Each structure stands twice: as structure tokens, then as C-alpha cells.
Image: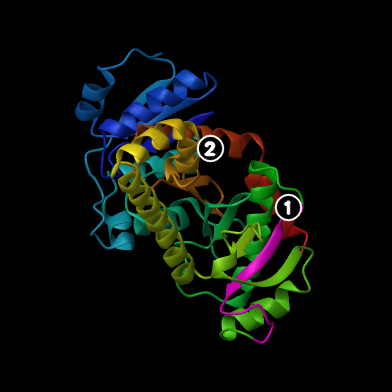
Amino acid sequence: MNVAVDAMGGDHAPEEIVKGCIMAVREDQSINVILVGKEEEIKRELAKYNYSNQQIEVVHASQVIDVHEAPVVAIRRKKDASMVKAFNLVKEKKADAFISAGSTGAILAGGTLIIGRIKGIERPALGSLIPNRKGVTLLIDCGANAEAKPSYLVQFAHMGSIYLENIVGIRNPKVAIVNIGEEKSKGNTLAKEAYALLEKEDLNFIGNIEARDITEGKADVIVCDAFVGNIILKYTEGLGLSLLSMLKESIMSSIRGKIGGMILKPVLSDFRKQFDYTEYGGAPLLGLEGLVVKSHGSSNAYAIKNTVIQCHKFTSLHIKEKIEQNINHK
């Protein structure tokens, strides 16, 4: 498969982006990467590594979309931007997937305007895996639709269930609405109306879930609007980092702690991985005609590598086609 990667997007572009792509093609020889961006800068980074020329291609783009630009305006005006050219590769079927760690707004705008939605999908949604005590939970939407309709949440639930069942392997995943209480009568109008609709769907809908129960793994797919979802996502990331930092400080504060830390090092390493976003790849924008994945803005090479591998799995399992079938059967 061919993965188009925005080499200029993210806090550590193009260094970490290029390095991550090299790691991915070394790990999986069935993947080809098309690095899109400023050719001279990309080739300077590529020169640091040994790799198969057949697996890495460079497409020059003279412009870059900055995170501070108005997304729709930038997508429409900057025709030679790395992100726009990479989107067009997917649209023209020259690439099977698109990855960027750049502007979330521009990715959403480009995905919708250039690639387009699956027929019947009202709005695409970003889905992100977050850790829980039993494994992971899919949070959807976590960044695409700050204002949503109840019907959007129903489609998010279906898309999220298909994604989780195929990618993570959780059969008949439990779906819940994140709310301020478990009772059916709780919440705002969006939550109440979405609850009434989801009760009638062919899903394993378990009702409302409070935020404190997400980490307990009481639901596999959490649906919400992006305003709520993004707050949960960012808080989870921040809490994980803070807990790890506090734990390290406590261990290093005494001789006894340092000795105990050495003994517990393998356990602590596994614990750290649970809160490390680089382990989970990127957040797919579900509901589009092509695969679009948003990587974390501060993604390092390891995160990019995992995102490229994630794209291969998504495509080989025909997630887009399964979402399309689900919508068409309604």
C-alpha cells in the first residue's frame, strides 16, 4: 500500500516524520511511503539513513499550512501546500492513506473538501484510543465537530464500533454516551435525544457513562461531541504525564525509592506505555472516502511509525468499506 505523509506537519517536522517513515518501511516491506513537502529538506533527512528507494518517494511541495492559519482558507488558497498535495494523492487513488501531524483544522477541512464524505455520513469524526484498566477505549468524536446533532452521535457510535471491533478485536463493543450522570434523564438536549435514538439501534448500547468510569473500562466506545471529547482526551494525556512525573520524583527522592524503582523498572515501563500516545498511532478521521489520520502535533518518530503501520491495518481490514456498508443498509 501507499501512504502519503505530510512531511512538513508537526512540531518536529521533517526530522521525526522522515525517521518514523524509515522505521515503518523497515518493519513492513509491503508499505510504500510518499513524503510530501520541501524536497531539499526531506532529502537532507533521508540521506541520514539506509533504506529501499522503492519504498520511499518524495513529492515536492513549496508551501506549508501553519497551525495559526484559517483552515478552510489555507486549504483553498495554498494549492502547493504539502497537506493539499498529499490529500490529492489520496483523492486521485495514488495513495491509500494520508497522515499529518499538522493543523487539525486544516486536516478536517482538507479531508472533507478534497476527499469527501462517504455517501450517507453526515459528519466525519476523529476517533482516538485512550487507556483504561482493561485495555483501551475509543473516544469519538474528539476533535472534528464541536457542535453536533443527535444523529451525528448515532453515526459516530456505528463507525466507532466497526473500527474498534476490527482494529482492536473487541467483539460487540459496549457503546455509551459520556454524560453527567447514568440516568436516562440526565444531561443536555444533545445527550437525551442521542440516548433515545441509540436505544433503537443495532448496537450494544449500555446507556450513559460518567467520566470517572471511562478509565474503568465500563464502555468500549464513548460517543460525544468534539468539545467534550477533546477536553477528555487532553486531560487524559496531561494526567498520564503528570502521574508518571510525580511517580518518578517520588522514586528518586530517597535511596529506598531508587532501589525499589530499579526492582520495579519493568512494571513501571509497562505502566508508562499505557499512557503513552505514541503507542496508539494517530486518530483516524472516520467517515471519509479515503483514510485520513491525524497524528499528535508533538509526534516523535516512534509515533509516526506506529501511525503508518496503523494505516496498513485499517486498509487491509477494509474499515472504510465496512462503514459504507453499515450506512447503506440503514
**Which residue is tagged 2?**
311
Is residue 136 visible to us here? yes
Percent coordinates x, y for residue 276 in the rendering = 44, 44
Q: Nearer the viewer, residue 188 or 155?
A: 188
Q: Are marks 1 and 2 in contact (CB under 8 Å)?
A: no
Mark in front: 1 vs 2: 2
- Residue type, numbered disc 2: Cys
**Residue ID at (54%, 46%):** 290
Percent coordinates x, y for residue 186 in the rendering = 62, 85
Instruction: Count neighbours of disc 1 (C-alpha within 10 A) and say few if under 14, some if 14 to 19, many if 20 or more.
Output: few
Q: CA distance from mark 1 to mark 2?
A: 20 Å
Percent coordinates x, y for residue 252 in the rendering = 30, 41
**Which residue is tagged 1?**
325
Quadrant into which the C terminus falls: bottom right
259, above or below 10, in the image: above
Residue 176: say if magenta: yes
Instruction: Count neighbours of disc 2 (C-alpha within 10 A) and say few if under 14, some if 14 to 19, many if 20 or more.
Output: many
Residue 169: say if magenta: no
**Residue ID at (61%, 76%):** 150
Callout 2: helix, strand or loop? helix
Is residue 120 visible to us here? no
